Amino acid sequence: MQPHQQCKKQLQIFQSFMLLQNFPMSNGKNYQLVLALVFAIEEINRNPHILPNMSLGFDLYTIPDNESNVLESFFFWLLGLEKVIPNYTCRRESKSVAVLLGATRKTSSQTGLLLELYKFPQITFGPFDHALSDPGQFPSLYQMAPRDTSLALCMVSLLLHFHWTWVGLLISEDQKGIQILSDLKREMEQNGVCAAFVKVIPEDTEFSLHLIIESSANVIIIYSDTNFVEELLFAIGQYFMTWKVWVTNSRWQDVSKMKHLILDSSHGMLMFSHYHGEIPGFTELTSTVNPSKFPEDIYLARLWHFCFGSSYSKRDCQTLENCPQNASWEWVPEYVFDMSLREESYNIYNAVYAVAHTLHEMLLQLVDTPKMVSALTLGHAYSLNIVFLQLHPILKKLKFENIAGEQVTLDEKMKLETEYVIHSFWNFPEGLSYIVKVGNFSPYAPHGQQLSLQEDLIEWSIGFTQTPRSVCTETCGPGFRKSPQEGKAACCFNCHPCPENEISNETDMDQCVKCPDHQYANTERNQCLQRSVTFLAYQDPLGMALACTAVCLSVLTSAVLGVFVRHQHTPIVKANNRALSYILLISLTFCFLCSLLFIGPPNTATCTLQPIAFGLVFTVAVSTVLAKTVTVILAFKVTAPGRRMRRLLVSGAPNFIIPSCSLIQLTLCGVWLGTSPPFVDSDTHSEHGHIIITCNKGSVTAFYCGLGYLGSLALGTFMVAFLARNLPDTFNEAKFLTFSMLVFCSVWLTFLPVHHSTKGKVMVAVEVFSILASSAGLLGCIFAPKCYVILLKPHNHFAKFSFHVSLRILESFCHGL
């Protein structure tokens, strides 16, 4: 393409990736950059509001991909010579005011240093490079591309979306690669993604693929802005690694090196690129461009020949015999000629407009100096040097909105974070391939909504029948927690079940969560269920049985009391102090009834009455048995008048045993209630899935003190009764008292270990059973023989028994008188 001959201002474009000989014939994607340049210039020339009465033009130069020959085209452009002669130029005039530089840092850095001698404005349309943003080294260089500030976050968001936590990193060894590696490591660490391996590869260095092949990571991230990606993927393709997913920042399209097979390693590759708006009319230009529209463009003719087989010896393709009729770029694969707007083309379009707006603003400032404008128009070197100095302040502050509605600025501090587009690479037989847009990433969206994907458009590699997995360890499901493996990455762990009453309702939880007290963990340990409140209720079979037993025994005791009252004048009732028998029967009735305080829903009243009722009624019962035992002993030991035992019996000393013992127990209960009284408590551990409402003893010490006192009293009573067991058989009530206390002590000695080994309502049931059993033992052992004699044997042995009992007691009283 030749320079426009009637233009007043010119722009130069340099491309490091265009080849001098075969670029126009085999690389149609680079030709799109030229079309973007032409499209932008023609738009500006037609616009009456930008540079009125002036036109823009351009010169096009290609730069070889050989680093040693990068500056050759620059000298040819600057000096007009194919051979460089120092301090000499064949060009008299130059109308160039800016240079558009190509895609790699090699080109921009080398030419930037050279053009900086002339303060020549340079605008790069390739990827953003931190090395070129140094204002001290490149003060005249500007970059159109946005920074990759969110690329690492974008890639990690994609990994998290597919739950890929075990990935490999292949990074090119340059400043951009080191920076993106640091960003990736930070984002991966914050989001729980681990690197199976990290390999930083120098440029132009062969790389062994054994690290990739042997790695357990199924997802590999590749970052590079050079031909490194193409060379690496081509080498990988030789191994047919169809079980790997490749994630890269490059829109890799050069499939000319690939074999025309669907079993290709790059099939399903995910690629990230900057989002950019669409330029109205540009797609129509690229789809309809042909040699007949631009007959002077020999590059287009060569590209047309390469794609359709036409001869380019003449400029008009329609006159050629071998030119296909109605040939269209739609017949050509995308990797040969892409009609959609590429990122570099979009940057060129914005760069041309940036220079045009800058020139327009500068001319407005120079409107009062017509000589300067005239010199600028004629391209005087001295005037252009002054122009360059005046362009830079305007370029640095330039900000405008392009036709796509996006803000364009060359000030790096004012540039907004860019959005990203995610593409999927489809490779089909016969070299057909497509790059399909499958998602977007916006750093401005709310957290969790930044990434949007259309998974149905993603074509995974042939080695996968479903969404690939890439993890070091399979996820720990609900009900399990992660346990790190020593010496390995955080993503490598073991799965252990949650402890009792703890859950994990998500995957890969570091710690299980304990259920609240009113809830419990289900068997899968993935959900907390509501506990049901329970207690020893009357509706329960156990509670109902104990309550019925208590009522029946209390009724039976009342019946025995009724029998004794009815037969109160009989000698057997009068024997051993009739009043003590009445007190014992009444206390036993209350012993049976006090067990009902332990059944039913506990409340403050019942919890407070339990220790008082239990302690007092049992103390009265046991002390009454003690009083009866002492009475029998005193009656048989009184043999001579004036002895001390006789005085004790006559004075009624046994009757003081009951109030004395009861007063001590009452004092202990008062101290207990005053210091740490019982209260309503909940037991969440005894029964799975239940909250048992119980009465907490409050002070355990006070509880065992009261129980210990009662036990001591019972043990003393048993010993006294045991000493009286050998009295004459005819009058041997002491044997019944001894046996009753043996049963009583046995029950409560058995109660202690059982009470310690049970919890919840079972413990309450044990308490109730102990109360009923010990009380029933006293009732049966003491009163059953007497009731048998009174009710069933009123005549046999009754007279003899009554005679001996009455005679012995009367003799004792007579001697006392």
Image: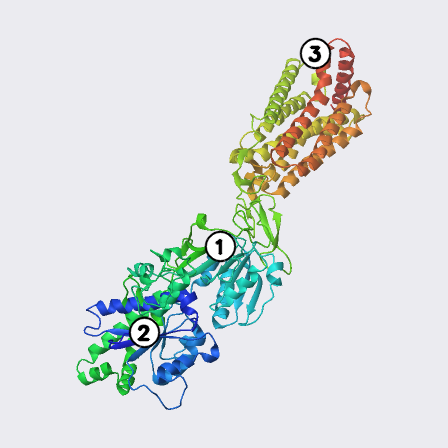
Report the residue marked by disc 1.
430
Quarter of the image where the C terminus is located: top right
- Mark linked to residue 791: 3
* Picture quadrant of residue 317: bottom left
- N-terminal-most mark, 2 or 3: 2
Q: Is residue 442 above or below residue 629?
A: below
- Residue type, numbered disc 1: Glu
From the viewer's perspective, tell me whether residue 549 is left or right of residue 159: right
The one of 356 and 547 positioned closer to us in this rendering = 356
Residue 143 % position (x, y): 37, 72
Inter-mark Cα distance, 3 to 1: 116 Å
> In this picture, is 763 found above or below 104?
above
Label 2's element? Answer: loop
> What's the residue at 28%, 79% (across, down)?
391
Quick one: 265 or 520, which is closer to the camera?
Answer: 265
Cα separation, mark 2 vs mark 3, equals: 140 Å
Please provide percent x and percent y for residue 654.
70, 29
Number of residues whose C-alpha sits closer than 10 Å to that of mark 2, classed few (under 14), some (14–19) or many (20 or more)? few
